Amino acid sequence: MTQPPAATRTTRPSADATRERILDAALELFSELSFEGATTREIAARAGVGQPLLNYHFKSKDELWRSAADLLFAELNAALGARIEGLRGVDDLTLAKLIVREFVHFSAAHPQLHRIITQECKVDGPRIDWLVDRHIRPVYQFTETLFAGLVERGEMVAIPPAHIYYIITGAGATIFTLAPECRRLAGFDPSEPDSVEIHANAIETLLFRG
């Protein structure tokens, strides 16, 4: 089977807490306001640093956005990679189920992932090109190959693998992306551990036949 994509960076930078604070603040604001809506001044303020210090670490807003995206996808790849590494030798059905569950748990902890992708998909532009080529396509290709085999063997619902991918990334993440709505509409916080497990169980039940 094709191996999962390698993480761009598997750990957060430990030598520079200031840079880390800036990146965390950037992820929050870019996911909330989009690249165009967020300003480096707002990011600096949320990180608790001055604008000159932000400019010292990142030469441009675009460099900051790309570095923040690299960090987020590195964490996703590290989480999925650790799960896959721990499952060496198991059958593909078990592997797929646990990868899906890992993605649901990651989405609950990092709703910025789906929000940033959604923000950049509002227009056809260079940032979504960069996201797809650098980060999204390797994950897609790995999962598409895995799902195709399961569909052929009747272990997943008979849906084209590309559609399975979007069902998982959409249904798996949307409840956490729309957490404020869920709390008001359904009366519970989807990020609570019990709610995350219920949601992971629901996705698994919908997709798998084994």
Image (cartoon, rainbow, N blue to C red):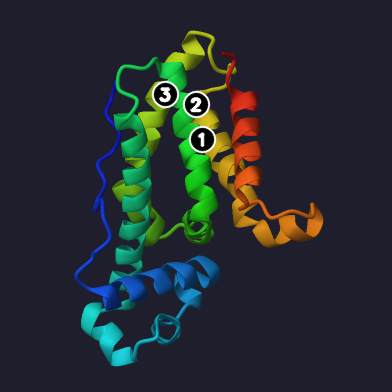
Q: Is residue 210 left or right of residue 152?
A: right
In the image, what residue type sits under mark 2?
Lys
In the image, what residue type sits under mark 3?
Leu
How far apart, in angstroms, are the residues tagged by discs 1 and 2?
Answer: 6 Å
Q: What secondary structure is found at the residue carrying circle 1?
A: helix
Closest to the observer: 178 or 187?
A: 187
* Residue in the picture at 40% in, 36% down: 140
Q: What secondary structure is found at the residue carrying circle 2?
A: helix
Which residue is disc 3 drawn over? 95
Closest to the observer: 26 or 91?
A: 91
Residue 145, quarter of the rendered image: top left
**Could you tell me residue 123's position as x and y percent?**
50, 60
Decide: marks 1, 2 in contact (CB < 8 A)?
Answer: yes
* Residue in the picture at 69% in, 55% down: 189
Closest to the observer: 81 or 165?
A: 81
**Furthest residue toward front:** 194
Closest to the observer: 73 or 98?
A: 98
- Up the image or down, 70 lies above or below 96; here it is below
Quadrant location of the C terminus in the rendered image: top right
Q: What secondary structure is found at the residue carrying circle 3?
A: helix
Which residue is disc 2 drawn over? 97
How far apart, in angstroms, are the residues tagged by discs 1 and 3?
Answer: 10 Å
Instruction: For label 1, count other residues whose C-alpha is less than 10 Å away and answer few (under 14), some (14-19) or many (20+).
Output: many
* Residue in the picture at 65% in, 56% down: 178
In the image, which disc is placed on residue 101? 1
- Up the image or down, 43 lies above or below 80; here it is below
Decide: marks 2, 3 in contact (CB < 8 A)?
Answer: yes
How far apart, in angstroms, are the residues tagged by discs 2 and 3?
Answer: 6 Å
